[in-house]
Image (tube, rainbow, N blue to C red):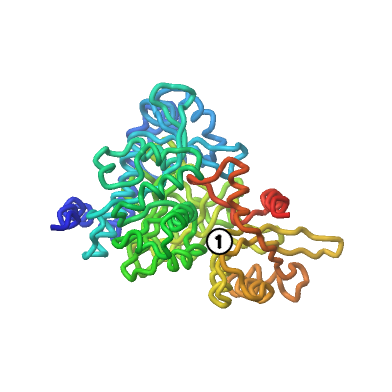
Amino acid sequence: MSITKIVRKVFEPRQKELEKHFNQGKALQEAVLGRLVAEAKDTEYGRNHAFSSVKGYDDFAKHIPVNTYEELKESIDRMRHGETDVLWPGRVKWYAKSSGTTNDKSKFIPVSKEGLKHIHYRGGFDAVAMYLQNNPKSRMFDGKGLILGGSHAPNYNLKDSLVGDLSAILIENINPLANLVRVPKKQTALLSDFEIKRDRIAREAMNKNVTNLSGVPSWMLSVLTRMMEITGKTHLEEVWPNIEVFFHGGVAFTPYRKQYEQLITSPNMHYMETYNASEGFFGLQNDPSDKSMLLMLDYDVFYEFIPMDEIGKENPTIVPLWGVETGKNYAMVISTSCGLWRYEIGDTIQFTSTNPYKFIISGRTKHFINAFGEELIVDNAEKGLAYACEQTGAEVSEYTAAPVFMDQNAKCRHQWLIEFKKRPADLQQFSDLLDKHLQEINSDYEAKRYKDITLQHLEIIEARENLFNDWLKLKGKLGGQHKVPRLSNSREHIEQLLKLNA
């Protein structure tokens, strides 16, 4: 008998429970807010912000300011040194290290035991619950899952306290029973040297019956490519005939989809997007035919949203979930059981539906180009590249883009540095198609491009093979949760890359 058939029953009660997301969104979120405030009212932050007097959302919004990492940094550092009851009750032992949009090299995001259980692990559980519901013939538990993770290190040498990639914290604390259905072994999964790790993962996993993959698309592809080199096979199903699903997140899948489809030709292969970050697990693709994700409303996360055009204002409009509109870009603000209160995560999303609440990730609040009023966001870039690739047969491995600022003739342009897996036959045609499609999907970009008066035709510079990996390695960020910044208003990243590309 199929083991998956038996295991399915474990997920059935949750599948039923998830139906509340379709008609009880506001009630679910109000319950989360009440629970979080009640649990944290006796913490230092709770006392300082009158949590005990908060009776609903309006009180909450009145008493608690919106925070960036900089506002919470001092409190988090005290927690890292062992202080208790600061932002969340008790002592928080784990900290997810994240490069991000702060003034520091790294952010350290608290991961409480409640956050681990009621946010991160619940997201993983629900991903499987939804997948099994959508795929009644699945046999995923008849084999093993290949789960990629980062690495961790001691936190200030405090006993049992760790700092590192969120994925490493999850692997370190996972239920021992889960190790029966996953590869590689824990020792390998937590190696810090990604080049050594990917080789060992490939060798450990290639003779196992792997049915499912979980990880960041770019790093997973690197591991799978290494396994193809070792085994001499062409397609992944030649190594793992029962492979059926890839649970992916961390970066947009669009640039990698064609490469995966070439690597895995089985008609039984499925792809499921997840929205999990160091700060929390927020969304799941519940419908395989719809690329938008369902916002998870009953975890320990309360959501608020700032319209993108108000980011940076002194008193921006902030709305709870029940105040959002479809088609608008919002910066996401979260409050969680990890002690993040009205915290600007740095991601922007766009709702495609409010019944249920479904969305796409549209970019980062600091990963966009708006040097000349063009407001180019990551979602535009992904769609533009996908169109140019579709029209020319090209494939993009990695890319970044930044503005070239005005010269003495008041001329300016966007400069794209692109590493192709498959180069277009005509790079100028690719460039023209990308530029044209960006104008079609972004009216601000189109207006600035009008007759080349302000913004000139974009420029593409071809990156050498492995440029972006070499750059990440140079910065000590190869593997794990690290990713290439796609768009930037400054030239800091692209100048470093261009120097390395010379």
Q: Position of residue 264 (x, y in %)?
A: 39, 65
Sort mark 1 into few (<14), some (14-19) or many (20+) by Cα contacts within 10 Å: some
Q: Is residue 500 left or right of residue 37?
A: right
365 or 125, which is in the foreground? 125
Residue 373 appears in the rendering: no
Which of the 4 image quarters holds residue 424?
bottom right
User: In the current view of this chain or complex, which residue is farthest to the left?
Assistant: 1
Q: Is residue 388 above or below residue 114?
A: below
In front here: 395 or 206?
Answer: 206
Instruction: Give the image location of residue 53, x and y in percent.
Output: 38, 34
Q: Is residue 80 above or below residue 102?
A: above
Q: Is residue 194 visible?
A: yes
Question: Which residue in the rendered view is the most extreme toward the right?
Answer: 408
What type is the residue that disc 1 sits on?
Ser
Name the residue located 38 percent from the left edge and 45 percent from the top edge. Answer: 301
302 left or right, relative to 361: left
| Quarter of the view holding residue 402 | bottom right
Asked whether 256 or 432 is in front, the reply is 256
Going 58% across and 76% down the picture, which residue do you hit?
A: 392
Horizontal side, residue 298 vs residue 81: left or right: left
Q: Position of residue 304 (x, y in %)?
A: 45, 50
Which quarter of the rendering shows the N terminus?
bottom left
The image shows residue 452, relative to residue 50, as above or below, that is: below
- Callout 1: helix, strand or loop? strand
According to the picture, the residue beneath numbered tag 1 turns out to be: 397
Q: Write the residue at 27% across / 38% down.
A: 175
| Near-viewer residue (52 or 346) | 346
Tell me the quadrant of the picture where the C terminus can be found. bottom right
